[in-house]
Structures are given as structure tokens and as C-alpha cells.
Image (tube, rainbow, N blue to C red):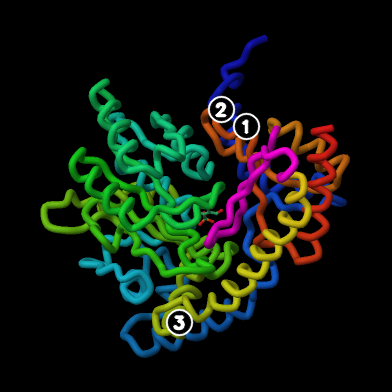
Amino acid sequence: MSSAFENTIFEDPILNVIHLLNSIAQENPEAISLASGRPDDEQCDPSLIDRGLARYRQHVADTDHSLATLLCQYGKTSGIINGILADYLQVDEGIKILDPESIVVCMGFQEACTLALLSIFEGGGVLLVPDPVFSGITGIAKLLRIKILPIPMATFLDPAALRKLAEELESRGEKIKALYAIPDFSNPTADSLSYHDRRAMLALAKEMDFFILEDTAYSYFRYEGEKTPSMKSIDSSRVFLLGSFSKSIFPGLRMGYVVAPEGAGVTPFSARLCKAKSLVTVNTPALCQAVVAGLLIENNYSLKRLNQPRVLSYTQKRDHMLECLEREFRPWVDAQRTLTWNQPAGGFFINMHLPFAFGYSEMCECAKHFKVIVFPTSLFSLTNDAVNQVRLSFSNATASDITEAISRFRAYVESRTQ
Ligand SMILES: Cc1ncc(COP(=O)(O)O)c(C=O)c1O
């Protein structure tokens, strides 16, 4: 008997990726996991909760506000720490916030992108995304029935090719309303946009009248070279900044924010974002906002110092994974020349190209028989472009786990190519 609840959007594999990333290791307890891009367990320090909260209490005591009302009552929809976040964005990102009410404090990036999409896509239009890309954006866009157009990563990273594609789309009558970008060390492929690419993307957005959804989740995690300015800091008028404290503090807080476009003549979006927020989660838990605000005040509105030991530790993990890949796969590469991996300057991932297709069933087989879990990059893709790619995450693995996992993965690759 057919049911109204069969073959719905909920069967779409993209909607299952976040759950799969969180569950695959539990289903294979004896396997070493390089699947999830969780921050390092060792860097999740619960004493930060007490410290943040204590510092925020002290901060409120110096004002006319009531701590009981701020922490225990329903709160202001846009948030109770907007001014503190504005100072933080100025210090760490060089972003000048004209009105702190253009910031809406959210429950992580995930709510921030939901609110941005809800406020932009009323009445249709298309969302451009690089492909492959983090399923947090494509999954929610699908749930909201937004038309998504995936752009091959090579085109996305080439301003001239991107412009040509955007012009072709508009000439076919597609109205581009927004483009999603992770400019620093993307998930899953760890690609970045150069300063020149960012400026070109902003110019295109202005010319063709669309918005950029800028996701800065990995921007603190640069292991070499100079920081590239965020697009929001270059031109706020076209950018919804989607921020997250999941990597820069820890994910259990579920804290993030969206900053609406600002500038002369810019459509005000804050009211729309707040209306959507008031119906999605009412307001972000005040306790979590207080912890973040206290930590920001304690650290002079910067998270750079707090993240220094993390950056050091992730740099070592990345270097160690690259050494293991070199040791295990170099002779093999030299012989066959069909296996490559990138050397990202930051982020949590290394992306590898294999000489064969690697999808969901191969991931399960590799976990079961070779006791290592690596995640198919294709599960983040809406096209067939990434079928032979695999994402290796080093952020939450110990050095000895990385050594053993890469050795086991080499054994799997050998078994597939004999
Ligand atoms: C590209 C990207 N953006 C944002 C996030 C953080 O999302 P949230 O703040 O909802 O934890 C992640 C986490 O995996 C991510 O990979």
C-alpha cells in the first residue's frame, strides 16, 4: 500500500549525511575513525563554561541589567550579547558592524543558515553552491524546497569561469538569489578562495544582484601563510556572514550567528531574520550566550589566544597525516600515478583522489574488513563529480590512530587494486 509518507524529500541521501557522520563510528566500534570533522576531544575544556559564565555575571553586575531577567527569562530574539559580538568581529575579523542589531545570535551555523535562507528565498530563485560541499547547507536548502545549482569546484575557484556560468544561468531565466561559500579551508575538500577570488565574487554578486552566504567555520585554523580578509570585511553590503563557535570554542554550546548585509541603500534583513528566528527557536539559550560573551570579554574580544594551542595541535596532526600518506602511498603513487591528495594550509581535512569509486557501500566494507572509517567525498556531492574521492579528517584522531588508520587504509586500497 502506498503512503503519503513514502518517497519524500526525507529519503534524499543529503539529509542523512550529518546523522551518518555522527553514527558511523558507533556502528563500527573497533574501527579507527577519520570520518567526522569533530574538534579534538582534548580541546573541549568544560572549565571554559564556568569561566565564561563567571566573567559574564561580573560584566552584568557592572550594568543596570538584572542577571535573573537576562539568564532566566525569555530573551530578546536577536540575542543578548550583540554588542559584544560586534566588538569581537571588529577585533578578530576586521568587520565594522554599523548596528549590532544586524547580528542575530543563533544556535550554531545550522540555524544561522536556515534563517538566512528563509529570509532570502521567499518567492523562488536559485542557490549556487560549490560541489562537493558541506551538507548542512544543501540539506536544509532541500528541506526548504529551494532550487540548488551545484557548481563544479574547479569552476567555483575560477572567477572567469564562475562569471560565465552565472551569466549563462541568468540568460536561461534562472534568478540567482544567493551563493554559498566557505572561503577558508572548505568542508569537505579544504579548498580556499584567494583575496582576488573573493573580490571577484563580491563584484559579481553586486553586478548580478545576489547575496553571498559566507561560512567562516574554519577561518581560525590556518597552519601557514597570512590570513585572507573575509568577504564581509571587504564589502558588507552583499554578504550574510554565517559564524559558528563550534570549532573556535566547542560544539556543545551550539552557538553561532548571522550578520545581515549592511551599508547605504542595502535592504534591511534583520527584521526578517528575527521574525524567522522567533518562530524557529524563539531565542538562543541565554546560558550559552553568557558563556561565549564572558570568554570574549575575558580574552579582550578575541579568540586567537584561546585557539593558539588548538592551531598548534591541528598543525601537528595535519603534518603527521601528510607524512603517513607519503610513507604509505608514495611508492604506490610512483608506480601507478593515479592516486593523489592535497596539502591544505588549514582546516580539518585532507581530500584524496583514488583510482576507483568509493561510496557508501565501500565505506562500510572498509570499516568492517579493514577497521578504518574514511568518508566518501561523494556523499557531500549533488553530482557525480567526486565518486573517486575520500575525505580524511585529522582533527579528532591521535597521532598513533592516524598512523594505524592510514596503514589500514593503504591495505584496503591495495585490496581494491590487485
Ligand atoms: C562548513 C561548516 N560550516 C559550519 C559548521 C559548524 O556548524 P554548527 O555551528 O552548526 O556546529 C561545520 C561543522 O562541521 C562545517 O563543516
Q: Quadrant of the N terminus?
A: top right
Query: Which mark identifies residue 30?
Result: none
Q: How far apart are labels 2 and 1 at the CA level?
A: 6 Å
| Residue 340 within the magenta-colored segment of the rendering | yes
Q: Is mark 2 within 8 Å of ligand 1?
A: no
Q: Is mark 3 within 8 Å of ligand 1?
A: no
Q: Label 3 is placed on what type of residue?
A: Tyr
Q: Quadrant of residue 99?
A: bottom left
Q: Secondary structure at mark 3?
A: helix
Q: In the current view of this chain or complex, which residue is farthest to the top?
A: 1
Q: Quadrant of residue 195?
A: bottom left
- Residue at mark 1: 387
| Residue 143 appears anywhere in the view | yes
Q: What is the crowding at mark 1: few (fewer than 14 residues within 10 Å), some, or many (at least 20)?
A: some
- Residue at mark 3: 56
- Residue at mark 2: 384
Q: Which residues are magenta?
A: 333-355
Q: How far apart are labels 1 and 3 at the CA level?
A: 48 Å
Q: Residue at x 47, y 32 (%)?
A: 142
Are the residues flagged by discs 2 and 1 in contact, CB closer than 8 Å?
yes
Q: Nearer the viewer, residue 232 or 48?
A: 232
Residue 68, image x, y percentages: 44, 77
Q: Label 1 is placed on what type of residue?
A: Val
Q: Residue at x 40, y 44 (%)?
A: 157
Residue 86, image x, y percentages: 31, 71
